[in-house]
Amino acid sequence: MYLLGYDIGSSSVKVCLIEASSGKVIASEFSPKKEMKITAIHPGWAEQNPGDWWTNLKLAHEAVMHESGIQAEDIKGIGITWQMHGLILVDKDQNLLRPSIIWCDSRAVPYGEKAFKAIGEEKCLSHLLNSPGNFTASKLAWVKDNEPEIFEKIDKIMLPGDYIAMRLSGQIGITIEGLSEGIFWDFKNNCISEDVINYYGIPKSFFPEIVPTFGIQSTVSAAAARELGLKEGTPISYRAGDQPNNALSLNVFNPGEIASTAGTSGVVYGVLDQLDYDKLSRVNTFAHVNYTPEQTRLGVLLCINGTGILNSWLKHNFATSLSSYGDMNDMASLSPIGSKGLSIIPFGNGAERVLENKDTSCSIHGINFNIHSKGDILRAAQEGIVFSYEYGMNIMRNIGMDIQVIRAGNANMFLSSIFRQSLASVSNAVIELYDTDGAVGAARAAGMGIGFYADSREAFSSLEKIAVIEPEHEKREQYTEAYSRWKNHLNEII
């Protein structure tokens, strides 16, 4: 018995097949091998053709089926995860009306800012747990104002995973998690937000039927079965946006549990069991995968834009004599905790929400030509990224998050022992590293959706823990001193 996971990213689509009882990955593939095209007709725009997601899903799916050699009837469930906050519009015949406005498109920022003031900042934060910002609702408002001929033809709006489920089943649905990431969900009244749709002039008929995150949402149609070589009637039993799903992939379901990633940008995502929010909207709060109106489970999302991109920039512009990130880590390890008084502010990848959308740029502080070397700069960069995480996690703590354990995939910055140890010691949290990814998590979740697994504990019982990093309590004073110095420099800037 097998389970499929589909991960719809903006760079590629990944497909993973797991054996249900063991949780073992049987085959996985992604497509395209080069990044998918993102169209930017104007500065700040970012669009993709959802048809490209489907084309690449089919290619990766075909490769997985060929590699595994299994029979279609042995696949018992399909899970879907996707790039968050995208907008897909279809007419009454399920035809696309325009390309998707994806997560990194910033054209709707003014719409969100006006809505925040018009609806009321306190009301937005207490009911939506966010500012309307540049999320899906604001993108739809932009379409209404700028493409009225398209707006008039809309039958249903969707997020990227809903579109894939529609292509698989012919049916359109949306989850509460999806509505919340689009800033359409009123958490106090447990319904689609009347404030948002009335302010923006969005008909309630645009919203599909609400389906459960876990459960038989729909089944594979005869047409999709022929197209993909699946069995007609195969359940689509899970869907969630990429950050809630990444947390699920790391078995993060309960209050106080934390998931983190550290790629080009970095994310810390924690689960909260009470309706709370940051009054300055420096972190975002969405429904977690196991949220229901009866059980409050919220995902608090901290995003740091200037993370691995700093390390990458140093590799390509500063440490060009070193052949790998491993070599950079080795050189950085020669520098002591605190990098001999050197501090790097890593926010050089645009405006940072955690800094109330200020764009501080990256900066180096305290450099001394007589004592500092390349290794000190490399270590200070990694420490600066860690300190930016701690700065954001303090905001999360202030709204009730108890951060004791941070779970992460064994990838990107978490491959660095300096990064891992510094993060554990500064945050005073244990770090657990796992061998998993979003597509694997979606496949496991599909098993929960069909009831094969009794609960999340059973679904993730085979999740492989690679390493545990404990805080260095005896060196905590050194880490704390370095963080305090870094924070003082940041405060001078902002």
Image (spheres, rainbow, N blue to C red):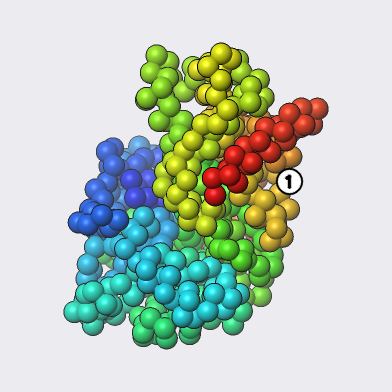
x and y percent of residue 174 in the render? 43, 71
Residue 466 place in picture, x, y as percent:
62, 32
Determine crowd level at label 1: few under 14, some 14-19, many 20+ residues with C-alpha closer than 10 A: some
Residue at (67%, 32%) from the top-left corner?
Answer: 482
Q: Is 2 located above or below residue 409 in the figure?
A: below
Residue 22 against residue 418 in the figure, above or below:
below
Establish if 331 lies above or below 277: above
Query: Element at badge 1?
Result: loop
Q: Which quadrant of the structure image shows residue 225?
A: bottom left
The residue that appears at 73% across and 29% down in the rendered structure is: 478
Residue 424 visible at all:
no
Horizontal side of residue 141 vs 349, given as left or right: left
Amino acid type, callout 1: Gln
Q: Is residue 44 left or right of residue 22?
A: left
Circle 1 sits on which residue?
404
Can residue 354 be seen in this snapshot?
A: yes
